[in-house]
Image (cartoon, rainbow, N blue to C red):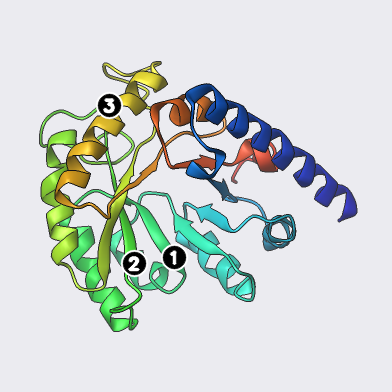
Amino acid sequence: MTDRRTQLADNLARVEERISAACAAAGRQRDEVTLIVVTKTYPASDVRLLAELGVRQVAENRDQDAAPKAAECSDLPLTWHFVGQLQTNKVRSVVNYAGLVHSIDRNRLVTALSAAAVKAGRVEQELGCLIQVALDAESGGRGERGGVAPDGVLELADVIAKAEGLRPAGLMTVAPLVGPYAGRPRAAFDRLMEISTHLRAAHPAANMVSAGMSADLEDAVAAGATHVRVGSAVLGVRPRLG
């Protein structure tokens, strides 16, 4: 366990150096960017070590992994982010532990989350909802990895804002593998920031921009992201799922 703690501490330090350097290069303050550590496939023991090392924001992408892990770590001062594609049959579980969901991309999901949030008593402690923007999607469509096309963002944000127990928190994207932004993460994240500007004009509190992962966090910071989602650079190369 001591070796693992040292490994995580060293990895966190390297990621911190990368974020700090990226902020300096972009003329931003370090506290403008929040690190979310993506702990998928790794055990609750790693989450505990990360918490000891000062991590406060953690993310999961599958409810079947996240729910028991969050329960096991319920004594820790953590905010849990759900970052994977979310099926409506999982929302009742997710609202019990997640502070924010990064993958809102359709009205039906908003309706289901709202009903679950109200049932869970989250009317005052609203669930933060980030709209996943698919930069590879045609108008009115969805992306290969989920997400709504850019022209659907404002309408979906209005639906979230009217939904009991939810609040529009901002935007999320994953650098697309196909389409005009494939292989161009900086351009993709710049486009996301443009969309964020329009969103904030209508919903000023929806100011989170979740973009960038282990391979492209510098591009995200340069573009103006407020949150970066880093997994393998902190925890190591993930074991294959069986």
Q: Where is residue 131 drawn, in percent x and y?
A: 27, 48
Dot placed on the residue nearer the N-terminal end, 2 or 1: 1
Res. 236 mark: none
Looking at this rendering, what residue extends furthest in the right direction? 2
Dot placed on the residue nearer the N-terminal end, 3 or 2: 2
116 vs 52: above or below: below
Q: Where is residue 121 drawn, in percent x and y?
A: 33, 83
88 vs 188: above or below: below
How far, Cα to Cα, is label 3 from label 1?
A: 27 Å
Residue that appears at 43% across and 74% down? 96
Label 2 Cα neighbours within 10 Å, binned few <14 / some 14-19 / many ≥20: many
Amino acid at the residue labelled 3: Arg
Proximity of marks 3 and 2: CB atoms separated by less than 8 Å: no
Q: Nearer the viewer, mark 3 or mark 1?
A: 3
Q: Where is residue 124 drawn, in percent x and y?
A: 31, 79
Write down the quadrant of residue 115 in the picture: bottom left
Question: Dot 3: what SS?
Answer: helix
- Asked if residue 155 lies left or right of residue 206, the reply is left
Q: Nearer the viewer, residue 110 or 209?
A: 209
Label 1 Cα neighbours within 10 Å, binned few <14 / some 14-19 / many ≥20: many
Query: What residue sits right under mark 1 in the picture?
Result: 98
- In the rendered image, the quadrant that contains the N terminus is bottom right
Proximity of marks 3 and 1: CB atoms separated by less than 8 Å: no
Q: Where is residue 130 drawn, in percent x and y?
A: 31, 51
Res. 127 mark: 2
Proximity of marks 2 and 1: CB atoms separated by less than 8 Å: yes
How far, Cα to Cα, is label 3 from label 2?
A: 26 Å
Dot placed on the residue nearer the N-terminal end, 3 or 1: 1
Residue that appears at 35% across and 73% down? 92
Res. 191 mark: 3
